[in-house]
Each structure stands twice: as C-alpha cells, then as structure tokens.
C-alpha cells in the first residue's frame, strides 16, 4: 500500500504514532519500519500480520479480532451500523479513553468525533488491515494519545 495514494490514512497513521515527517537524519527511525520489530508481541494480530502479509482478514477474522480487542480493553465499545445483504452485522468500534457507549457519552466528553472506514470496496483490503492495527495500537498505548482527545468511530468492513 502506498501512503501517497491515501493521504488521509497517512495523516491518521502519522498523527496516531506521533511520528515526525520524513527524516533527513541517518540512523534508526522509530516509526519508519513496518512491520515493527515487536509485531509478534502485539495482541491481537490481524490475519495479515499472522500470515506475513500474504493473506487478508475475512469477515470472521475481523469479528474475532474486534472481540479480542474488546475483551482485553476498557476503552472499546462495539456496536453495529446495520446488516449486509448477506445478513451479517457491520461492526462499528468506538475507541475512546474513557469509554464511550452512546452519543450522549460522546457529547459529555465534548471531543471531536472522527469516523474512519476501511474496506469501502471489496478488493480494497489495505484500509481494513491498517484500521484494525491502528485501533489495537492506539488502545494499547499507555501514554496519552489520540484516544484521550478524540472519540474514534471505526468501521473496518
């Protein structure tokens, strides 16, 4: 995936990581390498991450990932935005610290609400995989980050 083709995604990823722009310095770049060296220690892993990026997450994989994220977090609320033509729920992940379970909760926090959608079209899998990884990494970050100042509403599929 070329981030030049997806400037909004690049912006969100860089903002979430607190990464500076392109570096002119030599030496190791903390945010410049993907997958990160500690990828195997992160949990849960997407299907793409588990397969060395040779496979992509299917519907069941995404739902299992979201369930694992929710079970391990106090910042994740999961709901649906409707059903597909096949009758499957379309999951929505709300990520915020403190947790937001309703529009009233979000209003009380008085924070910007950011909607992010991945996998808009069937073959565009990169956004889905990146969004799942981003949700996991933002939730796991113990230091103050974007989930302390925004309410993220994410539709990975």
Image: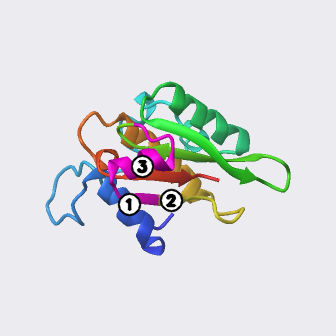
Which dot, 3 or 1, sits closer to the camera?
Answer: 3
Q: Earlier in the sequence, mark 2 or mark 1?
A: 1
Tell which circle, 3 or 1, labels the residue nearer the N-terminal end. 1
- Residue 151 appears in the picture as rendered: yes
In terms of depth relative to the viewer, which is nearer, 46 or 66? 66
Task: Point out which mark residue 110 bears.
Answer: none
> Sequence order check: which comes first, mark 3 or mark 2?
3
The answer to which quarter of the image holds residue 42 is top left
Q: Identify the residue at horizontal 66%, vertical 38% (top origin).
A: 63
- Residue 140: x percent and y percent? 37, 34
Residue at 25 percent of width and 53 percent of height: 18
71 relative to 78, above or below:
above
- Circle 2/circle 1 CB separation < 8 Å: yes
Q: Which residue is mark 2?
A: 116
Q: Quadrant of residue 66?
A: top right
In the rendered structure, which segment of residues is drawn in magenta?
Answer: 99-114
Residue drawn at x 61%, y 42% as measured from the top left: 79
Residue 12's disc number: 1
Is disc 2 surrounded by few (<14), some (14 to 19) or many (20+) residues within 10 Å? some
Tally of numbered tags:
3
* Residue at the (70%, 63%) spot, across then down: 123
In the picture of the structure, the residue carrying the numbered disc 3 is 106
């Amino acid at each position: 995936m070329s981030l030049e083709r997806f400037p909004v995604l690049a912006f969100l990823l860089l903002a979430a990581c607190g990464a500076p722009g392109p570096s002119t310095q030599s030496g190791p770049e903390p945010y410049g390498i993907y997958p990160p060296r500690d990828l195997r220690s992160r949990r849960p892993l997407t299907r793409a991450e588990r397969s060395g990026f040779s496979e992509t997450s299917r519907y069941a994989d995404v739902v299992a990932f979201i369930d694992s994220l929710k079970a391990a977090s106090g910042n994740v609320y999961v709901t649906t935005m409707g059903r597909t033509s096949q009758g499957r729920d379309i999951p929505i992940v709300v990520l915020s610290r403190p947790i937001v379970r309703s529009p009233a909760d979000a209003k009380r926090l008085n924070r910007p609400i950011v909607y992010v959608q991945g996998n808009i079209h069937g073959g565009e899998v990169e956004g889905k995989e990146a969004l799942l990884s981003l949700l996991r990494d933002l939730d796991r970050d113990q230091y103050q980050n974007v989930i302390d100042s925004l309410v993220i509403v994410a539709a990975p599929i």
